[in-house]
Amino acid sequence: MNGVFANSLPGTATNFTVVAGSGRDICVRGLIANCWSDLVCCNNTGTPPGIGSINCDPNEPNSEVVVVWTPPIVYDTVEISLNGTVVQTISGTASPFVTVTGVAGIREICVTGIIGGVATTPACCTVEIPNFIRGDTNHDGGVDIADAIRALQELFSGVPSLGCPDANDANDDGGVDIGDAIGILQFLFSSGSIPMPFPNCGPDPTSDGLGPCTHAACP
Ligand SMILES: [Ca+2]
Ligand SMILES: [Ca+2]
C-alpha cells in the first residue's frame, strides 16, 4: 500500500480487505517459481466510515466542553474543531474524548477522523455557554445609567428583555428584580461593584436557574 509492503497471502487467496478511503495505491503481484509477476494497482478512494455519534457536555463555569465519541474504526488521527477551526488533533489510538476549553457563546464542535489523508464526514454538536457582560442590560458593551433605566423599564414598563437574563442579574443572586437596578446604581454612584464576568464578556461563574443567554455585545 502506497509503496510499502502490507501483507503476504497464500497463492490461493483472491481478496484482501483494507479500510475504505485510505487513499493509497494498492498493488498486488504474484510469486511463482521465484519469479514475480507485474504489479497490478488500484487507488482506494472510498470514503472511510464517519466518527459516529458524539456527546458534548458543557462545563459552564469553566467555559469547557467534554466531548466523547465512539469511533467505528481506528483512524490515523482525529481532529476536533471549534466553529470550523481545528483546536486539537489526537492520535487515532488515543481514548476517544477531549476537553475543549475557551468555549463561550453558541459554538459548534465537530470531530473528524483522518485516515490515509482522507477526512470522514464530521460529527458535530452545538453547545451554548452564556457569554455576557453582567449589568449590561441594554447590550451596548458597557454599564452606565442607561442600563439601570433599561432594567427598570423591563421590570415595570413592559419593555422586552434583550435575551440574556444573566446580564440583567447585575448582583448575581440568581434572579432578576429591582435589586439588580439598585446594584447598577450603587456601582455607578456609590461604592458598589458588579460581579464577574463584568467588565468583560465571559461565562457565568455561578450556576443559577436563569435561562438561555444571547448577548449582542458578546457574539
Ligand atoms: Ca450597557
Ligand atoms: Ca439579581
Image: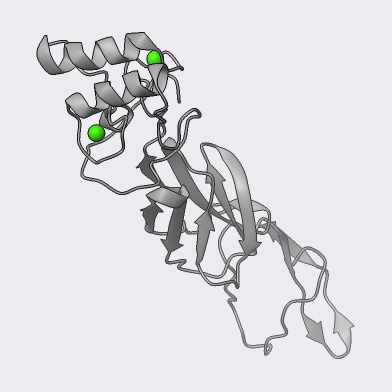
Exactly how many numbered labels are in the figure?
0
- Which residue appears at 55% of the width and 37% of the height? 84
Q: Check the image and report above or below for 192 versus 37.
A: above
Which residue is at the front of the view, 102 or 173? 173
Q: Quadrant of residue 194?
A: top left
Q: In which quadrant will I find the N terminus?
A: bottom right
Q: Quadrant of ligand 2?
A: top left
- Which residue appears at 34% of the width and 8% of the height? 146
Residue farthest to the front, as pictured: 190
Q: Check the image and report above or below for 122 versus 2.
A: above
Q: Position of residue 42 (x, y in %)?
A: 69, 58
Q: Quadrant of residue 150?
A: top left
Q: Position of residue 214 (x, y in %)?
A: 33, 27
Residue farthest to the right, as pictured: 34
Q: Position of residue 188 (x, y in %)?
A: 40, 17
Which residue is at the front of the view, 4 or 189? 189
- Which residue appears at 20% of the width and 44% of the height? 209
Q: Is residue 38 left or right of residue 132?
A: right
- Which residue appears at 50% of the width and 67% of the height? 96
Q: Check the image and report above or below for 49 versus 6.
A: above
Q: Position of residue 172 (x, y in %)?
A: 31, 38
Q: Is residue 90 left or right of residue 134?
A: right
